[in-house]
Image (tube, rainbow, N blue to C red):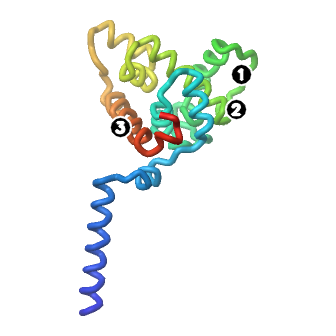
Amino acid sequence: MRRFVTLAVLAGGLLATFAVVQQTKPGWWERLWYPLRYEQIVRGHARNYNLDPALLAAVIYQESKFKADARSASGAIGLMQLLPDTAKGIALHTGGTAFRVDDLYNPEINVRYGAWYLRHLLDKYGDERTALAAYNAGQDNVDRWRRAGRGIVFPETRAYVERVEELKKIYRDAYGADLGA
């Protein structure tokens, strides 16, 4: 019986500690749950395309959890989950002459293309939330919603935008110095 009471007290203490850490979310806790990989690539392309590095990291985390070999059911590839046709267009816009789908598994190329695309969307729409909606749902959908005077129509896209905004804050708080944010 004493062992049971001791175990119960220890378990209660651990749960209480976990609850406090989960509630206060110290930097080490956020870094544990939200890793940052490819820091130099993220920083460099954020600087090159005048993006908030925490935003770029947030999009990468939401899209692929920083897994360079990620591939979606829709065929999106790599860290920033770019569709090959979109990436081919980006390659042409940025002076590329030879595009290979396998290049999208290269973190440097994928983040460069994704950062360019995110900057393009920010410039086109003029605000972050709309740009993120277009990143997720496509420009055609967002343009149609805007012409109809509507906000984000797809519930999953609204959730995506909210999550990326939340992740941006987490990455800024947890990695501000590492990202130069």
Disc 1 versus disc 3: nearer the observer: 3
User: For residue 137, which numbered disc appears in the image?
Assistant: none
Mark 1 or mark 3: name the one nearer the start of the chain: 1
Disc sitting over residue 99 in the figure: 1
Name the residue carrying label 3: 166
User: Residue 123: horizontal and vertical position, in percent?
Assistant: 46, 13
Q: Report which residue position mark 2 lands on.
A: 102
CA gap, disc 1 and disc 2? 9 Å
- Identified at 45% across, 36% down, the residue is 58
Nearest the eye: 66 or 21: 21
Image quarter of residue 4: bottom left
**Quadrant position of the N terminus in the picture:** bottom left
Is 92 located above or below residue 1 in the figure? above
Q: Residue at x 66, y 29 (%)?
A: 109
Taking the view exactly as shown, the residue that stands out farthest to the top is 147
Q: Is 161 displayed left or right of 69 in the figure?
A: left
